[in-house]
């Protein structure tokens, strides 16, 4: 059986996300409860979570989460990491033994910061440096895989039903101001934990439900800018696209959304001149980053969450608010189960980005 | 010394019962095949003069005529076939270089026909173009922009000039001279109506057609025929022709008898005398010289128009394209070895260059590998025969396609491949006024619009089937393609998997 990355595997999914805009932290339990409601949208072949604000004691360090196939590649990776980073703390990620989660790899966490001398001589900015190192481990070291690399955030994923994955990682012991989660319904057995979602790069994490038809056009374009799509998944390429547009091209979230889920030319024609000109410009500048085919995604970043559907809205997605809390999920039931009384709930239109950010002094 | 008689390859067959002796065939045939025999009291035909253009067949009111492949043969010989032997006779008769027209007719592999397209099933939905928007608009030019913002934080329009096409198909270069005034007018009008472009070729632009400038690409070729300031200003883009797929390595050749007074004026060459373009541009002997011409043309037109560099698909085209992409060109046009021509030496046409499918795949791959695919758009031509070819070309990595043979077919051409003789009975590849007037621009432009519109519908259907609703998401989307009956090397060059292999 080919591993994820050696073969492209279409998958259906469930996604859910929550943010407390006041910055108040909540345990991962609510997300487990939410995704468990959508049990039938997963098939036990992948689940995962991303939590923001979960490492306040190490918030200035990049938290690297790694899977290792064996101790040999662990040793090789650690020697590489030591050459490039100061490691403030490292340990195995604590898990709970469970019947339903099997074949677990070695799972390690490192809090690191780039070695100043190395960083300086690389002529890269700090994030670029970390990104390059992550790419190096994932592409060059066989059996090692960095699946989370942001600051004060972390991704937890495995092969299994998402609610079991949450329990496995003891997410009730973590508290964050924002969470996303994902249950996967792949069309064959990946059998590899790295293939589960969320997918992350630096502070960005993506959970995605869909199968994009533009995949290879997007992949071949984004790979020109140093990204390596090793997993062959939609989520991976979508994450790189957002990283490129937001971090490298410095677009706003809304602008990036208008690139990947661009308004139809016929819609653009009807817009007010100011809006129209900017949208035309974005489509002319980044035509190969338009994503077609069904998708609903939740993008997590240090300041918030963004929900976005493909422009035809070929996948379900609802968003809701209650006080400072905002919710987004594939199905309404996944929101109601954790907050039955909502201030408002609606289904955003195709291509319409919905952004919920931390308020005031909580902005990172 | 006497010529060896060569039996005609095709014979005119007349149904005597159906023929009413109306003599339409006689009037329609510029090659004087048909005549009325007073003694016999019926029409007769001299097949030795027939070029098999089907004009008489199409216009015969009683459908009494057809053209048949003649049964004359030499002793079977797998090495010395009929055509090869006849070509030796012909050269021994004349002592000349053999000339041919239109594209390479030899049985080389056609890769388009060995590539199959994907469609959506279950895991993502096909999209119905009758019910949902299906976008085929494409902008050609550089896309290597850096985001700059004005004082209000709005993104500045710092894009290099681009061409906007409503359909990813343009009419490829055919000069006034090689084709007629009416053919040019038909192409210009069709391009305007379709929201795409036609290309002047290297023969200049007739004064009457300056009004179609917004849909015109003006060409600058090695002979610089018809090139001056107003001409450069007239077009929406400028194309530097470095080579042509039908005859890589040599320049254009317009026989003197096609150079009428009007062609002479437009082309700025003497009437009745062959206009032969030099093989190279004599100011371009190297890639850095090309850069200078590109910027000279940009200077001359105030950096308002994209510059296209057109090259023939040859063995080293990927490296050449990479050089061009770094030389200031906005668009590269690649012309495959099956591309048409008004006249080319037969040996060159049939033996030089490579298939466009392979050239495109290797150029697109090379430019991406070097991270400069954004510097240019890619147009491909050289036998794009259908909407399916367009879809496959775009999925391999093209931004848009050039068509010319398909366009002249739409106007009535029957691929008799004798354009060089200047006696085109369909009024396309001729300058004889009596023949030119047979091509009605009202009708021919409508037929061109029909053809491209039909292709666009088909492109939309195929895209929708794949779950793709914008042509931008198809470009370079090679996972949507699979090869059948191709070997490892061919698959590797095309960058696609074999049919049956999963995603």
Image (tube, grey):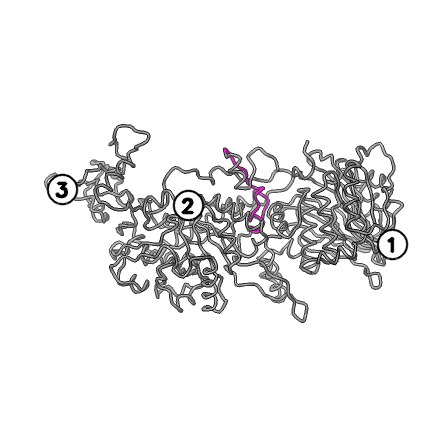
Residue sitting nearer the eye, B179 or A351? B179
Q: Where is residue B488 in the image (x, y as percent from the top left)?
A: 53, 35
Q: Position of residue A83 (x, y in %)?
A: 78, 49
Residue sitting nearer the eye, A55 or B66? A55
User: Chain letter of disc 2?
Assistant: B
Residue B37 marker = 3
Alpha carbon distance from label 1 to label 3 = 104 Å
* Badge 1 and badge 3 in a common chain: no
Q: Name the residue under label 2.
A: B353
Q: Which residue is drawn at 47% across and 39% down?
A: B111
Q: How crowded is mark 2: few (under 14 residues within 10 Å), some or many (20 or more)?
A: many
Left/right placement of residue B285 relative to residue A125 reads: left
Alpha carbon distance from label 2 to label 1 = 64 Å
Q: Where is residue B13 in the image (x, y as percent from the top left)?
A: 24, 36
| Element on which disc 1 rests | helix
Q: From the viewer's perspective, is the residue at label 2 or at label 1 nearer?
A: 2
Q: Name the residue under label 1.
A: A56
């Amino acid at each position: 059986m080919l591993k994820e990355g050696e073969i492209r595997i279409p998958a259906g999914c469930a996604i859910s996300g929550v943010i407390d805009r006041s910055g108040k932290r909540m345990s991962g339990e609510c997300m487990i409860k939410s995704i468990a409601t959508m049990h039938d949208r997963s098939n036990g072949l992948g689940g995962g979570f991303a939590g923001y604000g979960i490492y306040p004691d190490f918030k200035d360090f990049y938290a690297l989460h790694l899977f290792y196939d064996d101790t040999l590649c662990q040793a090789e990776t650690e020697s590489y990491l030591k050459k490039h980073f100061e490691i403030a703390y490292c340990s195995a990620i604590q898990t709970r033994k469970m019947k339903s989660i099997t074949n677990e790899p070695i799972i390690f966490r490192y809090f690191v910061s780039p070695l100043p001398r190395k960083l300086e001589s690389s002529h890269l900015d700090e994030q670029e440096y970390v990104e390059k190192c992550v790419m190096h481990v994932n592409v060059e070291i066989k059996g090692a895989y960095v699946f989370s690399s942001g600051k004060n955030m972390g991704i937890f994923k495995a092969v299994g039903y998402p609610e079991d994955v949450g329990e496995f990682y003891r997410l009730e012991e973590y508290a964050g101001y924002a969470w996303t989660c994902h249950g996967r319904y792949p069309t064959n057995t990946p059998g590899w934990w790295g293939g589960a979602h969320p997918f992350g790069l630096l502070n960005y994490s993506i959970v995605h439900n869909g199968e994009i038809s533009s995949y290879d056009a997007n992949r071949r374009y984004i790979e020109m800018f140093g990204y390596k799509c090793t997993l062959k998944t939609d989520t991976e390429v979508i994450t790189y696209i957002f990283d490129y547009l937001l971090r490298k091209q410095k677009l706003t979230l809304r602008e990036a959304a208008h690139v990947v889920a661009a308004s139809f030319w016929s819609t653009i024609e009807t817009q007010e001149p100011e809006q129209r000109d900017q949208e035309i410009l974005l489509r002319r500048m980044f035509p190969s980053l338009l994503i077609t085919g069904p998708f609903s995604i939740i993008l997590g970043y240090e300041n918030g969450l963004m929900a976005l559907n493909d422009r035809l809205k070929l996948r379900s997605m609802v968003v809701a608010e209650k006080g400072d809390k905002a919710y987004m999920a594939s199905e309404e039931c996944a929101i109601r189960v954790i907050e039955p009384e909502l201030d408002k709930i609606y289904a955003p239109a195709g291509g319409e980005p919905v952004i919920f950010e931390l308020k005031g002094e909580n902005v990172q | 010394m006497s010529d060896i008689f060569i039996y005609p390859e095709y014979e005119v067959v007349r149904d005597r019962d159906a023929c009413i002796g109306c003599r339409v065939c006689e009037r329609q045939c510029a090659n004087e095949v048909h005549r009325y025999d007073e003694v016999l009291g019926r029409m007769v035909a001299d097949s030795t003069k027939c070029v098999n253009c089907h004009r008489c067949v199409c216009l015969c009111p009683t459908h009494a005529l057809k053209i048949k492949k003649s049964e004359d043969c030499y002793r079977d010989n797998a090495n010395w076939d009929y055509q090869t032997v006849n070509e030796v006779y012909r050269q021994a008769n004349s002592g000349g270089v053999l000339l041919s027209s239109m594209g390479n007719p030899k049985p080389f592999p056609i890769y388009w026909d060995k590539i199959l397209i994907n469609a959506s099933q279950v895991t993502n939905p096909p999209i119905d173009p009758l019910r949902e928007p299906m976008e085929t608009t494409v902008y050609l030019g550089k896309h290597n922009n850096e985001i700059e913002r004005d004082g209000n934080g709005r993104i500045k329009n710092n894009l290099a000039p681009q061409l906007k096409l409503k359909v990813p198909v343009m009419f490829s270069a055919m000069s006034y001279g090689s084709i007629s005034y009416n053919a040019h007018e038909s192409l210009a009008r069709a391009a305007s109506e379709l929201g795409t472009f036609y290309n002047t070729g290297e023969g200049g632009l007739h004064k009457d057609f300056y009004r179609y400038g917004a849909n015109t690409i003006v060409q600058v070729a090695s002979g610089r025929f018809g090139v001056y300031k107003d001409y450069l200003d007239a077009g929406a883009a400028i194309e530097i022709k470095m080579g042509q797929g039908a005859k890589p390595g040599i320049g254009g050749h317009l026989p003197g008898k096609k150079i009428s007074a009007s062609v002479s004026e437009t082309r700025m060459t003497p009437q009745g005398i062959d206009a032969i373009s030099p093989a190279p541009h004599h100011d371009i002997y190297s890639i850095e010289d090309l850069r200078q011409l590109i910027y000279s043309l940009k200077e001359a037109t105030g950096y308002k128009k994209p510059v296209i560099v057109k090259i023939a698909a040859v063995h080293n085209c990927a490296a050449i394209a990479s050089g061009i992409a770094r030389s200031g060109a906005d668009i590269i046009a690649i012309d495959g070895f099956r591309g048409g021509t008004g006249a080319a030496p037969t040996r060159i046409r049939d033996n030089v260059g490579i298939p466009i499918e392979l050239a495109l795949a290797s150029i697109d791959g090379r430019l991406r590998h070097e991270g400069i695919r954004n510097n240019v758009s890619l147009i491909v031509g050289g036998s794009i025969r259908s909407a399916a070819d367009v879809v496959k070309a775009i999925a391999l990595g093209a931004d848009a396609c050039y068509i010319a043979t398909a366009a002249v077919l739409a106007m009535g051409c029957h691929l008799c491949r004798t354009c060089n003789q200047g006696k085109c009975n369909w009024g396309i590849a001729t300058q004889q006024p009596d023949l030119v007037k047979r091509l009605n621009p009202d009708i021919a432009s409508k037929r061109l619009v029909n053809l491209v519109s039909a292709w666009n519908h088909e492109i939309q259907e195929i895209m929708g089937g794949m779950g793709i609703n914008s042509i931008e998401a198809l470009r370079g989307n090679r996972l949507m393609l699979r090869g059948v009956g191709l070997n490892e090397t061919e698959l590797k060059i095309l960058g696609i998997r074999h049919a049956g292999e999963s995603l």
